[in-house]
Amino acid sequence: MKGGVKLLAVCLCLAVATVVVAEDPYFHYVWNVTYGTASPLGVPQQVILINGQFPGPNINSTSNNNIIVNVFNNLDEPFLLTWNGIQHRKNSWQDGTAGTMCPIPPGKNFTYHFQPKDQIGSYFYYPTTAMHRAAGAFGGLRVNSRLLIPVPYADPEDDYTILINDWYTKSHTQLKKFLDSGRTIGRPDGILINGKAGKGDGSDQPLFTLKQGKTYRVRICNVGLKASLNFRIQNHKMKLVEMEGSHVLQNDYDSLDVHVGQCFGVLVTANQEPKDYYMVASTRFLKNALTTTGLLRYEGGKGPASSQLPAAPVGWAWSLNQFRSFRWNLTASAARPNPQGSYHYGKINITRTIKLVNTQGKIDGKLRYALSGVSHTDPETPLKLAEYFGVVDKVFKYDSISDNPTSDQIKNIKIEPNVLNITHRNFIEIVFENHERSVQSWHLDGYSFFAVAVEPGTWTPEKRKNYNLLDAVSRHTVQVYPKCWAAILLTFDNCGMWNIRSENSERRYLGQQLYASVLSPEKSLRDEYNMPESSLQCGLVKDKPKINPYAGA
Ligand SMILES: *[C@@H]1O[C@H](CO)[C@@H](O)[C@H](O)[C@H]1NC(C)=O
Ligand SMILES: *[C@@H]1O[C@H](CO)[C@@H](O)[C@H](O)[C@H]1NC(C)=O
Ligand SMILES: *[C@@H]1O[C@H](CO)[C@@H](O)[C@H](O)[C@H]1NC(C)=O
Ligand SMILES: *[C@@H]1O[C@H](CO)[C@@H](O)[C@H](O)[C@H]1NC(C)=O
Ligand SMILES: *[C@@H]1O[C@H](CO)[C@@H](O)[C@H](O)[C@H]1NC(C)=O
Ligand SMILES: *[C@@H]1O[C@H](CO)[C@@H](O)[C@H](O)[C@H]1NC(C)=O
């Protein structure tokens, strides 16, 4: 009998343990990263595969899942992946940028462990090392809502991921050589939809099939290097329901401008004559636009797609108007049951304004891109590890740019690590000022922000009158049109080292990025996790024993 009681007690313990774990289930992946050959534009070329796939596998998850990805780097170069838009609460250790992690050496592996904590939405991952992004290793990453939390639309029939991107037939090594020698990578050679360029001659296989009358959720991400792309589907409207993790007011669009790094979630209803239709992706703001198609097929449909492709919009004013039509749905629940609009961001006082001005220039005859006069370079010791092991003095200085740079500071470009010191929980306004003639796309890791305005001209404090302080969309990437500015607002409540970067790969590679260091003032493990046991070490801290930075604090 006694033994029976003991056994029961053990069972109860196990049951309790299981319940705790069951809250946040684990999903394990093993990824083998290798070179391979593909011919997306008809010419065989080297690509980067994940488990033999180009693009890489899509990750399907639900809010708060534990996602474990053991990445084996079988390339001949160091490699890292970033999970674009995943906020990694208290955990910049998993962010996959050169400022937060040592790259995975060739022939070695590293296991990412991250949780899309209180997040839903459409995201993607991509490599941050060298110009690897130009060769593949990107893929979709979706976070579904937990069952208990209402989603503001009916369950779709299926859920499709569409990755669109500009593409070069030159290898990532060749593109990197161009940049290292101080020149641009120039114009892309074509556009891909899920790794393929449509021939459009009736020989293409459908990428997706639809059942007549059913509604599908379609997630569209621009995973490319630099081109803004317009996406549209013959004869079909797209009902926009989500953008980078936020439910938005549901409007119908004939086409959507998707800037590099951005994702949209739309609903598409198969309500047309049953036959084939083209999805179209084409470049914006580029002379002699590049276009590609992908095929949609109605099950049991008869007839090929019409060769008449819907035209792309013209000019950036159209795009700006489309940006202005995006609104947060204040009454919809996000990843938590409370409505999105219960967070009144418009009522919080701004404690600091940081102006980031993008420029380009030549240093020793070589092209560099800068932010407020500093062109970032990655030290061999990741910035985050320099902070952790107490060797900042040997690696970088905080605040190499000023919040309100003078024109002299902007003009005289310096190459050095660019790190902002940001006080935990400050509510900050960041203004991206673009005096150049090209469109910019800015991304912030570790957070989502309110994109309260994008306007032509030069920003002044008076422009705050025109901010959307009610229902601007909370997102992670914002575009800035030529000779325009964009303003974003956010609370820096996530401790860590966070990358602010141009999603334009050549600009990022040549210095248009920086890091926001948000330290825990209480030095508390409640604010930030300790460095994981499995973290790789390199540079000055290669052989240092791991410590608890907060011990005794
Ligand atoms: C990864 O793929 C390469 C090439 O196909 C193969 O040689 C290697 O054994 C694979 N590694 C793992 C861990 O599966
Ligand atoms: C994957 O997606 C399907 C819907 O397409 C969903 O029912 C399922 O729960 C998802 N898996 C996870 C882990 O979220
Ligand atoms: C590398 O893979 C092995 C085998 O799966 C695993 O045990 C180990 O923890 C991994 N190493 C890292 C640093 O993730
Ligand atoms: C906003 O969300 C609510 C609550 O889920 C939903 O009923 C409503 O249809 C949505 N409104 C729009 C305009 O999308
Ligand atoms: C915000 O600033 C205004 C004006 O300086 C001040 O009156 C108000 O109390 C502040 N609000 C909060 C919540 O700090
Ligand atoms: C960062 O800024 C805070 C507040 O402005 C200051 O207390 C702290 O010393 C700074 N930290 C560093 C490392 O410069």
Image: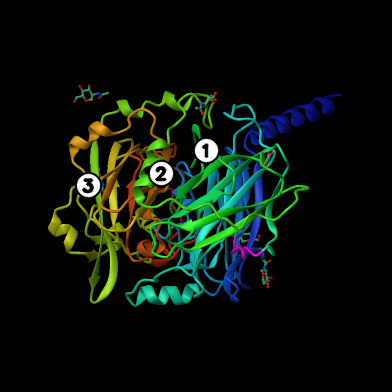
**Left or right of 167 in this view: 360:** left
In reply to whether residue 32 is colored magenta, the answer given is no
Task: Tell me which label, 1 or 2, sits earlier in the chain.
Answer: 1
Q: Nearer the viewer, residue 412 or 297?
A: 297
Q: Nearer the viewer, residue 161 or 400?
A: 161
Q: Which residues are magenta?
A: 195-201
Q: Nearer the viewer, residue 174 or 301?
A: 301
Amino acid under disc 2: Ala
Q: Quadrant of the N terminus?
A: top right
Does the residue tagged 1 have its C-beta within 8 Å of any atom of ligand 4?
A: no
Image position of 430 with respect to 439: above or below: above
Classify mark 1: helix, strand or loop: strand
Task: Tell me which label, 1 or 3, sits earlier in the chain.
Answer: 1
Instruction: Please provide percent x and percent y for residue 380.
Output: 38, 67
Instruction: Please provide percent x and percent y for residue 365.
Output: 24, 77
Amino acid under disc 1: Leu
Instruction: Please provide percent x and percent y for residue 332.
Output: 51, 26
Classify mark 2: helix, strand or loop: loop
Quarter-of-image position of residue 344: top left
Q: Quadrant of the C terminus?
A: top left
Q: CA distance from mark 1 to mark 2?
A: 48 Å
Classify mark 3: helix, strand or loop: loop
Amino acid under disc 3: Gly
Dominant secondary structure of the residues highlighted in magenta in the image:
loop
User: Would you name the residue on which mark 1 appears?
Assistant: 240
Quarter-of-image position of residue 207: bottom right
Task: Tell me which label, 2 or 3, sits earlier in the chain.
Answer: 3
User: Would you name the residue on which mark 2 appears?
Assistant: 551
- Observer able to see residue 85: no
Q: CA distance from mark 2 to mark 3?
A: 50 Å
